[in-house]
Amino acid sequence: MHELSLAQSLLDQLLDLAREHQAKRITRVAVTIGPFSGIVRDSFEFGFNILKESMPQTKGAVLEVETPDPVYVCLDCNRVSVIPFAQSQSPSELALGGAYPKKCPWCCLNRLSPKGGTELILNQVEME
Ligand SMILES: [Zn+2]
């Protein structure tokens, strides 16, 4: 499972940070999951919450996940638009190159290209 190994590498990163700062415990972690990352949020949270319990430093850590709306660049007019996913589409479907928004809200042409949003970003860590 893709999400499980991502959760594990996030935890590894947190343990490194705790060691670096001589912290006993990680209390809160904030991450951003990019809309084109193909990461399923629920699976990622599920994996993290199971794996964190095996380590005294991360046990009880609160995970906050932010999932920003996808951003597109129009290849015709170069304008950038934020177009939320339709409810019927999942980020993983879109990451596979499936359904893109129909058209640019500025010039109404249909050559939109996803901009960024392919990563999992660690934003904030609180430790004590
Ligand atoms: Zn356009």
Image (spheres, rainbow, N blue to C red):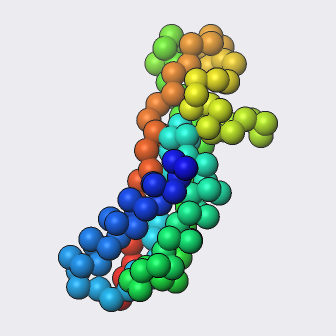
Point out the residue furthest to the left here: 20
Location of the C terminus by quadrant is bottom left
Along the horizontal axis of the image, is 42 left or right of 111? right
Q: Give the percent coordinates (x, y) of residue 74.
A: 52, 19
Q: Is residue 100 left or right of residue 56?
A: right
Q: Nearer the viewer, residue 78 or 112?
A: 112
Side (left or right) of 105 relative to 38: right
- Residue at screen point 62% across, 10% down: 109
Please name the residue shown 63% across and 39% down the image.
91
> Residue at 48% of width from left, 82% of height from top?
59
Q: Residue at x 56, y 32 (%)?
A: 95
Above or below, 14 relative to 33: below
Please name whichever residue, 102 or 8, is drawn nearer the observer in this view of the structure. 8
One can see residue 124 in this view: no
Is 56 above or below relative to 65?
below
Q: Residue furthest right?
A: 88
Q: Write down the quadrant of residue 96 in the picture.
A: top right
Q: Is residue 21 visible in this depiction of the protein?
A: yes
Q: Position of residue 35 (x, y in %)?
A: 56, 41
Residue 52 locus on image (x, y percent): 48, 74
Q: Is residue 96 above or below residue 112?
A: below
